[in-house]
Amino acid sequence: MLSLQIISLHFFFLLFGLNHHTSFFLFRELNPNLKISDLFLALHGYQIAVQCRSVESCWFAQVAMVEVAGNTSKPFLDLGSFVGDLNVDDETTSDDISLEGLEEELQECQADDVVANILSKGTTLREYTKGVENNLRQVELDSIQDYIKESDNLVSLHDQIRDCDMILSQMETLLSGFQAEIGSISSDIKILQEKSMDMGLRLKNRKVAESKLAKFVEDIIVPPRMIDIIVDEEVNEEYMRTLEILSKKLKCADADPTVKTSKALKEVQPELEKLRQKAVSKVFDFMVQKLYALRKPKTNIQILQQSVLLKYKYILSFLKEHGKEVYLEVRAAYIDTMNKVLSAQFRAYIQALEKLQLDIATSNDLIGVETRSTGLFSRGREPLKNRSAVFALGERINILKEIDEPPLIPHIAEASSKKYPYEVLFRSLHKLLMDSASSEYLFCDDFFGEQTMFHDIFAGPFSVIDEHFGTILPNSFDAIGLMLMIRIIHQHQLVMSRRRIPCLDSYLDKVNIALWPRFKMVFDLHLHSLRNANIRTLWEDDVHPHYVIRRYAEFSASLIHLNVEYKDGQLELNLERLKMAVDDLLVKLSQIFAKQKLQTVFLINNYDMIISVLKEAGPDGGKIQQHFEELLKNNTAIFVEELLLEHFNDLIKFVKTRGSEDPSTGTERPITIAEVEPIVKDFASRWKAAIELMHNDVITSFSNFLCGMDILRAALTQLLLYYTRLSDCIKRINGGSTLNKDLVSISSIMYEIRKYSRTF
């Protein structure tokens, strides 16, 4: 009965356009006890009936559903009375049926394969429709049977769904309880979180307070072990570490005002003060003992400073902070000790160096001083090598290449009986000074943390060196040595600049300032010796280079060489003054010779010697060398003319006076054969002998063979020019061809010139 009701209602719902799912929920609302299997079978049967649009099928499905449900009662809804006489005949007409669009549908059906296949068989549409309906009914019956077979499973599924609903309902109840409990737990957690944050903040504050309190206790507490070390133990590394701890405790009491007012500190502070006094007293005694060790003879001060004292430099920091008066005493004791020790060492070193000094020059060793009165070569039987070093630089220049060499060791040098010019001793002394000063300056900066005390320490050594220098400098007449010392000081200044140690700047400047005036004074002595030289005593009846001029050449070359890298304008000016004095002296000496030729030879020999010495000193002699080269050139031209006039006087006079005249010009006194013929025959008869005499004259006159050969070649070349002009003049004379047999060919003269050139 229930199934028929369901089917009837569903059919009714379908007529109003409700779908299966909507119908299902409506039936459940009408009857909650409705089984899913009954509802499913009933709905499916009526669905088929409606799709088939057959009243018979609907009734068939209704009866089948009733049988399945086991209920043969009369349907709840009489479909016959509801539907009435439903006629589905094709001829049935209705005003509601519209034929609009039929033509288009028929045209579309003509192209349909199924419709075309049916029409091709000759079957009417009615018959085909009935066949389709029969097939549908069969399919429906088969489907119903399948549903009937699965009814048990559907019932079981319905039971399972109901059980699930119950379980889900219980779970819903349980979860609702959980939700309520979780809500209460959440509020509890929030309360606990607030309490935890509050406790954490209090814990943090207590830890901060604890750390500050622990630091305070640690800062002011005086461990027994610390007392034992400071009072009883020796000064060593552990003692210095204990001093660092004590220093922190002492500074803590003074730094923090809150700590300073605490009762605990007031109880501990007397003990800290006692420990401070004990520590200061103990380290003072210790440092005094170490300083006394510096005074022992033959003590290597640098090693003692680096390997011993620097290990205890914290002691000085402790004294500077907690025992200022004691620190000043230690500082003063160190300054006094090092002042005396270094002064004694430098005094002993200077005394040892003085034994090695080689005297180079005295007040009489000047350029313009006459040597015969003083006996230059016999004076004291000193070797010539040492005497020549007064004016010549020689190997003394090597001292500038040995700037960084270690200082001399006096007893080793003394054992070899070797003597040194003073600039060698000067370099050695100042090298020792630089090394000692650099070491002491760095040590004071590292050990005491002070650089100013260096000058207090080295006041004594500076005084010793100044005293020595004050005795040496006034007695120094060695201008070359003085200039070498000036260059040494300059190099030492560069060394200290590279070391970045300024402690000797003022001292080196002072030495440099002292050296320059002394050099200027000695240089002026040389200059005055040239200007005031006694020409009569200096003159020698010899055309070879004069020894005074050689001194000048060597002296100037030495100073020019020392000035190459420095370009000192003051020195260049002084050398220019010296050059002018030598020019004047040379002219005066040459004028004493009776013959003009000897005067010229004397000047040429001296100029050539000066140029040679300047070239040996350096490739570039500068303006001074150029000056003497110009003088040499002028005097060479004069000598050539004098030499040619001596041997070919008639030829040269004729060429100079008559050789340039043109015989065809109709002058008052034309050149004749008789005037030229004696000159031509004279030259042809003795020209080779005259050239040989000229050669011998040049060889004996000039000390420099190369210079003599240059002069001879210039004379022969000039002779060739004169003779060529004579030959040209003869060609212009009427009847001059008659002299051709007596003329010497130019090629013969050229051959002779080349012969003498080969000797060169």
Image (cartoon, grey):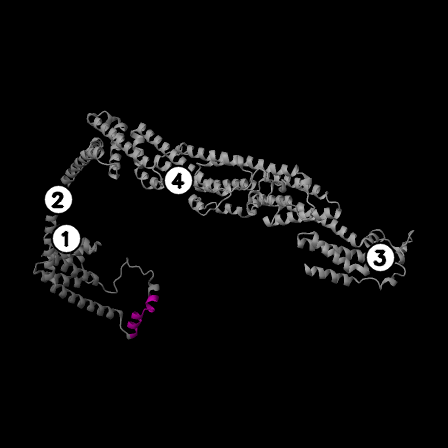
Residue nearer the viewer, 697 or 113: 697
Q: Alpha-carbon neighbours of circle 4 within 10 Å: few (<14), some, or many (≥20)?
A: some
Say which amino acid is labelled 4: Ser
Which portion, as a residue range, is magenta?
106-120
Say which amino acid is labelled 2: Phe
Q: Determine whether, in the image, residue 23 is placed left or right of residue 552.
A: left
Q: Earlier in the sequence, mark 3 or mark 2?
A: 2
Residue nearer the viewer, 603 or 485: 603
Say which amino acid is labelled 1: Phe
Give SS at disc 4: helix
Mark 3 or mark 4: which is in front? 3
Which residue is labeled 1 in the image?
A: 27
Mark 3 or mark 1: which is in front? 3
- Can you tell which mark lies on residue 178? 2
Which residue is labeled 4 in the image?
A: 439
Q: Earlier in the sequence, mark 1 or mark 4?
A: 1
Query: Where residue 585 sits in the image (x, y, percent)?
Result: 68, 41
Mark 1 or mark 2: which is in front? 2
Distance between the Cα atoms at labels 1 and 4? 116 Å
Which residue is labeled 3 in the image?
A: 679
Q: Alpha-carbon neighbours of circle 3 within 10 Å: few (<14), some, or many (≥20)?
A: some
Say which amino acid is labelled 3: Ile
Q: Determine whether, in the image, residue 148 is placed left or right of residue 626.
A: left
Mark 3 or mark 2: which is in front? 3
